[in-house]
Amino acid sequence: FSHSVVIRASVPKLDLDDAFEQKNDIAKAVEDELEKAMSAYGYEIVQTLIVDIEPDEHVKRAMNEINAAARMRVAANEKAEAEKIIQIKRAEGEAESKYLSGVGIARQRQAIVDGLRDSVLGFSVNVPGTTAKDVLDMVLITQYFDTMKEIGAASKSSSVFIPHGPGAVRDIATQIRDGLLQASHHHE
């Protein structure tokens, strides 16, 4: 019975996980104790083997629940980490999209300015006596008529009232020009 004394002396010092992990150490302690006891009778103990540790059913159930809870925590952490990465990537994508959209708008506006400048220069050269103001007035009138055409082609039922006629076009051009002058005056 010396081996059961050794097991009863060793195992209570360990928690259950350690008992499973240290089966070989417990077997070695039993072997040493048996060797001492049996050598007096001429027996040599070559090896002892602990086949299995069988805890109470309630203890096994509790261990399984603890392991399941630990796995659930790890899975929840990994899921949260994955969602965080997805949100970061989405935010980075939106920021990049907005940046590229801003670059596109800036290039579009620059192209419009370049086109207007080239039109003014070309018109002034080809039609002697015209000024940059005359050309810009013509561009404004063209854009005004383009706007009228788009409003007329729209199939929406809402009504838009726009003053029309040569005088109205002149007034709109004057209002735009005055607005631009006032804006540049405020910036100075």
Image (cartoon, rainbow, N blue to C red):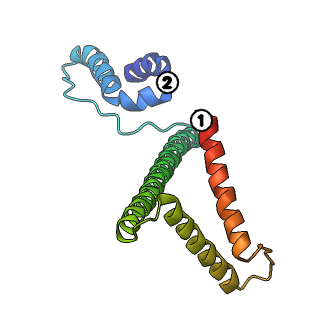
Q: Where 34 falls versus 81 (above or below)?
A: above
Q: Decide: few, some or many residues near mark 2? Use Cα within 10 Å; few <14, some 14-19, many ≥20.
A: few
Numbered circles on residues, count: 2
Q: Where 49 falls versus 31 (above or below)?
A: below
Mark closer to the chain start, 1 or 2: 2
Q: Decide: few, some or many residues near mark 1? Use Cα within 10 Å; few <14, some 14-19, many ≥20.
A: few
Of residues 25 and 8, the one nearer the viewer is 25
Of residues 182 and 133, the one nearer the viewer is 133
The residue type indicated by label 1 comes to His
Of residues 148 and 68, the one nearer the viewer is 148
> How far across and how far down the image is residue 156, in percent?
74, 82
**Image point (46%, 47%), residue name:** 92
The quadrant of the rendering that contains the N terminus is: top left
> How far across and how far down the image is residue 87, in percent?
53, 48
> How far across and how far down the image is residue 119, in percent?
41, 66
Of residues 73 and 138, the one nearer the viewer is 138
**Residue 27 appears left or right of 152:** left
Residue 187 numbered mark, or none: 1
Q: Secondary structure at mark 1?
A: helix
Q: Where 182 falls versus 131 (above or below)?
A: above
The residue type indicated by label 2 comes to Asp
Tell me whether circle 1 and circle 2 mark residues in contact (CB < 8 Å): no
Q: Quadrant of residue 69?
A: top right
Q: Alpha-carbon distance for marks 1 and 2?
A: 79 Å
Looking at the image, the residue that sits furthest to the front is: 129
Residue that label 2 marks: 15
**Residue 111 appears left or right of 75:** left
> How far across and how far down the image is residue 150, in percent?
63, 80
